[in-house]
């Protein structure tokens, strides 16, 4: 008999993937970042709230996830481009 729960979790795994999450310091962005990290993704956390962004990064890391915070105002095309380039370098 196949362990269906295990098989479903394997299918939904994000291990080896990188998720870029905007608004990651609070609300839906925060919950999305936590969920993606729990599913195995390395998460690039983007927000303008540096204090909360760093706290979320630490929280995810303490739980065994991989996270890095990037300060970025997503209303700025230049900042978005620079941030994506920084994520790629990581």
Image (cartoon, rainbow, N blue to C red):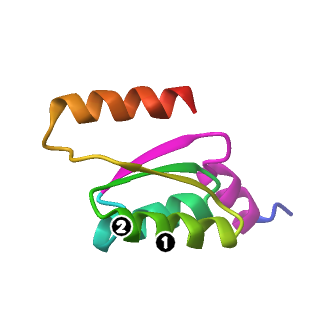
Residue drawn at the location 35% of the way across and 67% of the way down: 25
Residue drawn at the location 80% of the way across and 65% of the way down: 3
Q: Is residue 31 magenta?
A: no
At which x and y percent is residue 26? 32, 72
Q: Provide the residue designation for mark 1.
A: 55
**Mark 2 Cα within 10 Å, few/some/many (few <14, many 20+)?**
many
Report the span colored magenta.
4-22
The disc, 2 or 1, on the residue closer to the chain's N-terminal end is: 2
Residue drawn at the location 25% of the way across and 35% of the way down: 79
Q: Do residues under tags 2 and 1 come within 8 Å of each other at their CB atoms? A: yes
Q: Residue furthest right?
A: 1
Asked if residue 28 is positioned above or below residue 19 in the image, the reply reads below
**Mark 1 Cα within 10 Å, few/some/many (few <14, many 20+)?**
few
Q: Is residue 17 magenta?
A: yes
At which x and y percent is residue 43? 52, 51
Residue drawn at the location 41% of the way across and 64% of the way down: 53
**Distance from the alpha carbon under mark 2 to that under mark 1:** 8 Å
- Secondary structure of residue under mark 1: helix
Screen quadrant of the N terminus: bottom right
Work out whether residue 86 or residue 4 is closer to the camera in this orientation and state it.
86
- Position of 87 with respect to 6 (left or right) is left
Q: Which mark is residue 25?
A: 2
Work out whether residue 34 or residue 52 is closer to the camera in this orientation and state it.
52
At which x and y percent is residue 27? 29, 73
- Position of 84 with respect to 16 (left or right) is left
């Amino acid at each position: 008999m196949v362990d269906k729960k295990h098989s479903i979790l394997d299918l939904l795994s994000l291990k080896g993937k990188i998720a870029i999450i905007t608004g990651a310091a609070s609300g839906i962005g925060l919950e999305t970042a936590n969920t993606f990290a729990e599913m195995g993704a390395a998460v690039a956390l983007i927000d303008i709230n540096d204090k909360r962004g760093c706290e979320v990064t630490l929280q995810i890391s303490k739980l065994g996830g991989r996270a890095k915070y990037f300060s970025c105002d997503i209303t700025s095309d230049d900042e978005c481009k620079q941030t994506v380039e920084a994520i790629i370098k990581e």
